[in-house]
Image (cartoon, helix red, strand yellow):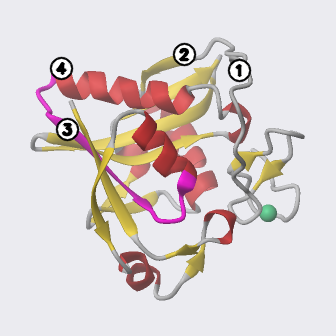
Amino acid sequence: MNSCAYCDANALYRDRGNGDYLCLTHARLEVTGPRGEAPRPPLTIRPSTPADRRQIAELTYYFWGETEIECFDHSYQVDTLPAYVACDEGEIVGAVSYARKGDADTLITLNVLPQWQGRGVARKLIAAVAEAARAEGATRIIVATSNDDLPALALYQRVGFTITGILAGRLVEHHGGVEAGFADIPVRDEIQLELRL
Ligand SMILES: [Zn+2]
């Protein structure tokens, strides 16, 4: 796991130009043209097993600072949820955790280590959940993100999610004030999205 090049915070992103590791505050978006296919080393995507629990907890803690995540008014202990993991040999470099309820699967966390971002890992993890959900009769996948999380909003819409709701100010209430998020954008609103299967 890596620290930000500009402060001591955990790095959630990586500078595509110089390889620096970046925290939320120091990450910036830039517009670039297609630069050809990024190299795609072999990664295994598979359902998690009980033996993965410690690594999933570590990955969750690295990104979220906790392993209990609140989502759609429920609290989830992430390392006990069903999940798919992306593995580089034995090491888990990305994971998606989800919860099944009625006709919908809810994505609870989706995280890929910065050195593995930009290689389609998150897209493959979402596809794995979608395939399992479809096979078990679910009709949609739902996810909630925050107004500042531009990379997540971009990713979800690229893979077919559409915005179904915006709870304006919801995260100010939840955090007890305005916190700084991605690229120092104030975190205010919960944005809900849905993927029809
Ligand atoms: Zn930083």
Categorize mark 4 by other alpha carbons within 10 Å: few (<14), some (14-19), many (20+): few
Q: Which residue is mark 1?
A: 38
**Residue 101: where, in percent of width, then height?**
15, 46
**Residue 70: where, in percent of width, then height?**
36, 64
Instruction: Give, as a three-letter code, the residue at label 2.
Output: Thr
The quadrant where residue 75 appears:
bottom left
Instruction: Give, as a three-letter code, the residue at label 4.
Output: Ala
Q: What residue is at 70 percent from the left and 41 percent from the top?
A: 114
- Label 2, label 4: how far apart the Cα atoms are: 21 Å
Q: Which residue is mark 2?
A: 44
Q: Earlier in the sequence, mark 3 or mark 4?
A: 4
- Label 3, label 1: how far apart the Cα atoms are: 30 Å
Q: Which one is closest to the eye, mark 3 or mark 2?
A: 3
Q: What residue is at 31 percent from the left and 46 percent from the top?
A: 162
Instruction: Give, as a three-letter code, the residue at label 3.
Output: Arg
Q: Which residue is mark 4?
A: 135
Magenta extent = 136-150
Q: Which residue is mark 3?
A: 140
Q: Of all residues shown, which one is farthest toward the top?
A: 42
Q: Which one is closest to the eye, mark 3 or mark 1?
A: 1
